[in-house]
Image (spheres, grey):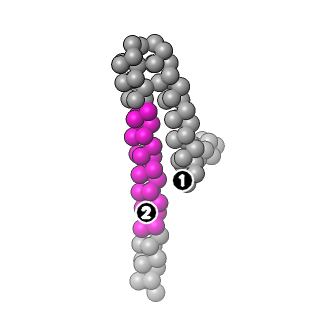
Amino acid sequence: MLNKIGRLFVIKNRFEAFAIIYALALGATNRGYAYLESFPPYWGEALFLAACLAVLMGGAAILDSLKTKNELEELKAELAADRGEKRD
């Protein structure tokens, strides 16, 4: 049962990754807008920029890990095919 629930939280393709990054970006800009209202001009702008850059860095990490995961699955399939050919 927990495995079925756990699979809901796994990013399987680039569309899901971009949807998550978009949601993170919306939250970061909302938080950045609050920083602009709460802090003096320079500090508010700096915190707004930091919130947006954090999403960019997180998004890059998500996309990179998804690419690495796909490459690993392809290599495993290739290795399994090679092992199957050697047994015959």
The x and y percentages for residue 4 are: 62, 46
- Quickly name the residue at label 2: 71
Q: In the picture shown, does residue 59 fall above or below 24?
A: below
Q: Which mark is residue 85?
A: none
**For the N terminus, which image quadrant?**
top right
Residue 32 lies in the magenta-colored region: no
> Which residue is at the front of the view, 72 or 47?
47
Disc 1 vs disc 2: which is toward the camera?
Answer: 1
Q: In the picture shown, does residue 37 fall above or below 72?
A: above
Circle 2 residues within 10 Å: few <14, some 14–19, many ≥20: few
> Which residue is at the front of the view, 61 or 85?
61
Of the two numbered discs 1 and 2 on the same chain, state the one appearing first in sequence. 1
- Confirm or deny contact between disc 1 and disc 2 (CB under 8 A): no
Numbered range of the magenta stretch: 52-75
- Determine the residue positioned at 48% across, 15% down: 37
- Determine the residue positioned at 43% across, 62% down: 71
Can residue 3 be seen from the camera position used here? no
Q: Main secondary structure of the magenta part?
A: helix
- Determine the residue positioned at 50% across, 18% down: 34
Residue 65 lies in the magenta-colored region: yes
The x and y percentages for residue 69 are: 45, 56
Q: Which mark is residue 14?
A: 1
Secondary structure, mark 2, is helix
Secondary structure, mark 1, is helix
Can residue 42 be seen from the camera position used here? yes
In the rendered image, which quarter is residue 22 located in?
Answer: top right
Q: In the picture shown, does residue 8 fall above or below 73?
A: above
